[in-house]
Image (spheres, rainbow, N blue to C red):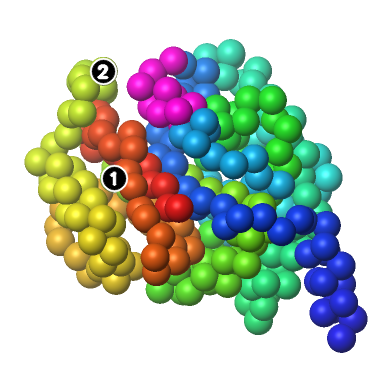
Amino acid sequence: MNALNDLHKISGSFSNTEKMPVLFLGHGSPMNAIEENQFVTGFRNLAKTLPQPNAILCISAHWFTNGTKVTAMEMPRTIHDFGGFPQALFDVEYPAKGSPELALETKELLLPTEVELDEHWGLDHGAWSVIKHLYPEANVPVIQLSIDYTKSGQYHFDLAQKLSALRTKGILIVGSGNIVHNLRLVDFQNFEKDNYGYDWAIEARETVNNYLLDGNFQPLIDFEKQSKAFQLAIPTPEHYLPLIYTLGLKGKTEELSLFNDKLLGGSLSMTSVKIV
């Protein structure tokens, strides 16, 4: 009963709102944090359509853990989890507050799954490099939920559904990754070419987009059982699974739309999803 009372008390700290959108953002290179390009413009245009959230819960490709964790510190650090980029990128700080209250509420909502309250992680570039374009003043609290790498696509889809109550508490839930993401095969010589993809990447993008727009999510959940093009597009699952969290939160009557829907460097896609 105490846990229920605590949860009720915490819920009271977030005002009831209209149902918030859910996003999947193709985050691409960390350089998108400081460059001006069509994808950054896409994020900024998106921001103009969003209601002001009470807080953000981000599921990033770059927090891939054994078990599930949620950041619970008052002030998450800006993590520069990359190498070989200009100093200007390492100098970026995104000083958004955390939300221990939201972390605790998330932990309670996901029961009986055990969720560890984490005091060490912070905001990795999957989170801050895109959220900074939505809320450049860092005036919205942000927490991150990790992705348990021991679990299946179906597990993550089902887990996401438990978070739906947060959407009417003003919480913007953001998945951040890339649907087509094969870094080993990137064609850097053609990286600036607009909407350039290998044949398998074009096939994978088209197939995924059709499933998304048709609301046919089961093949996307079972991505490991799909075509060779899928296997090349998703050689490892960490950048893809944030999409599954976004899809798990879609209501039956909600609209799904795509933006920034282009291929990059042959073997990457920037396709992003908005559900409202």
Q: Is residue 113 left or right of residue 22?
A: right
Residue at the image position 67 percent from the left and 72 percent from the top:
109
Q: Is residue 210 left or right of residue 217?
A: left
Q: In this view, does 55 lie to the left or right of 82?
A: right
Residue 49 pos. (x, y %): 50, 36
> Which region of the structure is painted magenta?
36-45
Q: What residue type is labelled 1?
A: Val
Q: What element carries label 1?
A: loop
Q: Is mark 2 on a helix, strand or loop?
A: loop
Residue corresponding to mark 2? 192
Residue at the image position 28 percent from the left and 57 percent from the top:
212
Q: Which amino acid does label 2 sit on?
A: Glu
| Residue 69 seen in render | no
Query: Which residue occupies the foreground of this view, 60 or 254?
Result: 254
Q: Does the magenta stretch include residue 98?
A: no
Task: Point out the tag, 2 or 1, that comes first from the N-terminus.
Answer: 1
Residue at the image position 37 percent from the left and 42 percent from the top:
272
Against 82, residue 120 (above or below) is below
Against 35, residue 95 (above or below) is below
Residue 147 pos. (x, y %): 54, 59
Residue at the image position 42 percent from the left and 47 percent from the top:
274
Q: Would you call the spot at circle 2 few (<14 residues within 10 Å), some (14-19), or many (20 or more)?
A: few
Prevalent SS, magenta region: helix
Within the image, what quadrant is residue 65 found in? bottom right
Residue 256 pos. (x, y %): 35, 53
Q: Which disc number belongs to residue 180?
A: 1
Q: Does the magenta stretch include residue 42?
A: yes
**Mark 2 vs mark 1, CA separation in Å:** 17 Å
Against 71, residue 226 (above or below) is below
Q: Residue furthest front?
A: 18
